[in-house]
Amino acid sequence: MKPKFDHGGNVFAIARSLGVQPEDILDFSASINPLGPAPGVRDALSAAFNSIVHYPDSDCTELREALARVHGVEPANICVANGSTELIYLLPRLAPGKRALVIAPSFSEYAKALTRDGWSVDRFVLASDDGFTLPLERLEKSIRKGYDLLILGNPGNPTGRLYRLPEVEALLNLCRGSGCFLVIDEAFMDFCEEESAKHHVVAGDGSIVLRSLTKFHALPGLRLGYAIASAMTIARLAAVREPWSVNTPAQAAGIASLADTGYTAATRKFVADERTHLSAGLAAIPGLRPFPSAANFLLVEAVRGPSAGELAEQLLAKFILIRGCGNFAGLDNRFFRVAVRSREENDRLLAALAAAVAYAPA
């Protein structure tokens, strides 16, 4: 079968189509912490069981307090949601206007959420040839064409490119000067926390940071994300969010995971080490070009030989799933993304890719 790549992590549907169990699939398409959830999460979920007879705390008070401690902001600067995707779909009701500019390649749900609410969406496409550099002068000219909202992923998804804080500060200033609301999606910023713009967005209105507990904390099945912004922006966001969207077990899991600072440190070291190993292994395979990444995944270009789609099909025959990136604006069927997993799993991927490239028709 030919796999679909609308999103990564489609392991259940793929497994059904192959007639196997989900655990038989080695999933490199979804970028989830390879260490799994923090050790205390299981006990926290069990302890929360008796509370499911009550409605959840719609304000997520304890979780907001925990997040505020971690990030050095006030609880009033945080809004918790059912994954950062819920927040993305609330953006049209948060920001005034109807014209948006999305820095691409980027997560497809940005445009879907905005167009569904009647917004027109344009893309500012970054070039792979220069490593997806952010050309601020050219971007400023685009912003001044009358856009009401600008979205930047940092680190970029699927590029993995990290834009340093001075660059993001400059972008914030550009947007504030133009009256353009800036959304910074920091779903993968936990891997490089020092570059977060969180303290800048809380200092004034007109911008917001979106964060996720899915990737770093390995909780995708619970759906947990949050926004950081000024107290006024958060109050407006909370007013348009549906009540009880974050269930009690999810809140308990988030609190337990955030409390485990050892897990946080271990994750950052493990991912950094394995990312270096995986990147070097990919670069050693003829025809493959991995891009530098600050996240727990790598974007790879098949510069010659089999296309990404052909590689994906060959790997799927070995029950290995990768994320083709041909449906991202600015990319094509030469690009694919792979998550950083354990050493044994990463080596299995490298061996499968090397074999697929070696035996491809000339």
Image (spheres, rainbow, N blue to C red):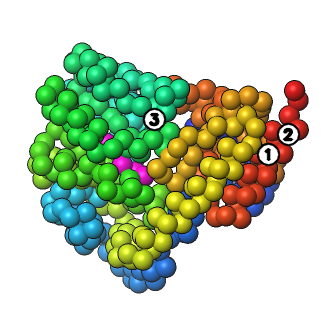
Label 3 or label 1, whichever comes before in sequence order:
3
Q: Which residue is mark 3?
A: 106
Under circle 2, the secondary element is: helix
The residue range painted magenta reads 183-188
Closest to the camera, between mark 3 and mark 2, is 2
Under circle 3, the secondary element is: loop
Q: Would you identify the image quadrant in which residue 182 lies?
A: top left
**Front in this rendered view, residue 291 or 6:** 291
Q: Amino acid at mark 1?
A: Ala
Is residue 184 shown in magenta? yes
Q: Amino acid at mark 2?
A: Ala
Residue at 43% across / 71% down in the picture? 265
Q: Are marks 1 and 2 in contact (CB under 8 Å)?
A: yes
Q: Are marks 3 and 1 in contact (CB under 8 Å)?
A: no
Residue at 30% across / 51% down in the picture? 196
Label 3 or label 2, whichever comes before in sequence order:
3
Cα distance in 3D space between marks 1 and 2: 6 Å
Q: Which residue is mark 1?
A: 354
Considering only vertical position in the picture, is 300 above or below 254? above
